[in-house]
Amino acid sequence: MKRRRDSTLRCAIALSVALIVVSPCLAAVDVPVYPGAVLDEQATRMIHRSKPDHPEYVVYNAPDSFEKIEGFYKKLGATDVPHSRNISAEVKYVVLRLPGKTYFVQLSWIAGNKNGATTLLFGLPPA
């Protein structure tokens, strides 16, 4: 019984720490997250290490095609950030802004990606 309680307590502490680390990022994003996209905590931590001046960046992965996800945001009124679109057979990339929203969403897809996912990065534009 005591072991089970200790195990439950350790799990609760680990979950609380994970939420404390990630939740400040999630709370501020004012752009809708694509339905079915899953938070990529590892990629979010990696980008925080590589870009410490952007602690608001949050990374998600979605199993749907780049085009389907882009269509979702276009229906919400999203427009391309000028000169951000790069579409080829190997790479698809665009940064989108939504009217009245503070955050942008960057969509990217790379051919040969092991999971075939489209990556969504949410962040604030440069000041």
Image: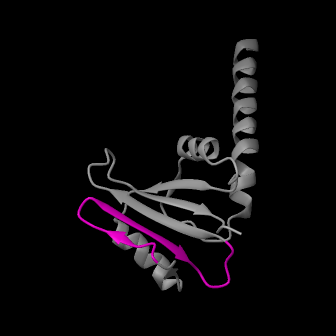
The residue under the point 74% across, 36% down is: 17
Q: Is residue 108 left or right of residue 110?
A: right
Q: Is residue 115 above or below residue 80?
A: above
Residue 34 appears in the picture as rendered: no
What range is drawn magenta here? 83-102
| Residue ranking furthest to the top | 2
Pick the residue in front: 62 or 56: 56
Q: In this rendering, is residue 26 above or below 46?
A: below
**Horizontal side of residue 16 vs 80, given as left or right:** right
Find residue 100 and report its image quarter: bottom right
Image quadrant in which the N terminus is located: top right
Q: How is the image coloured?
A: one colour
Q: Is residue 88 magenta?
A: yes
Taking the image as shown, residue 102 lies to the left or right of residue 68, namely right
Residue at x-position 63% and y-position 56%: 57
| Image position, residue 28 (x, y; %) | 73, 63
Q: Residue drawn at (76%, 25%), measured in percent from left and top?
A: 9
Residue 3 seen in the figure: yes
Residue 12 point in image, percent of width and height: 73, 32
State the image coordinates of residue 8 (x, y, percent, origin top left): 71, 26
**Image location of residue 50, percent across then percent down:** 59, 44
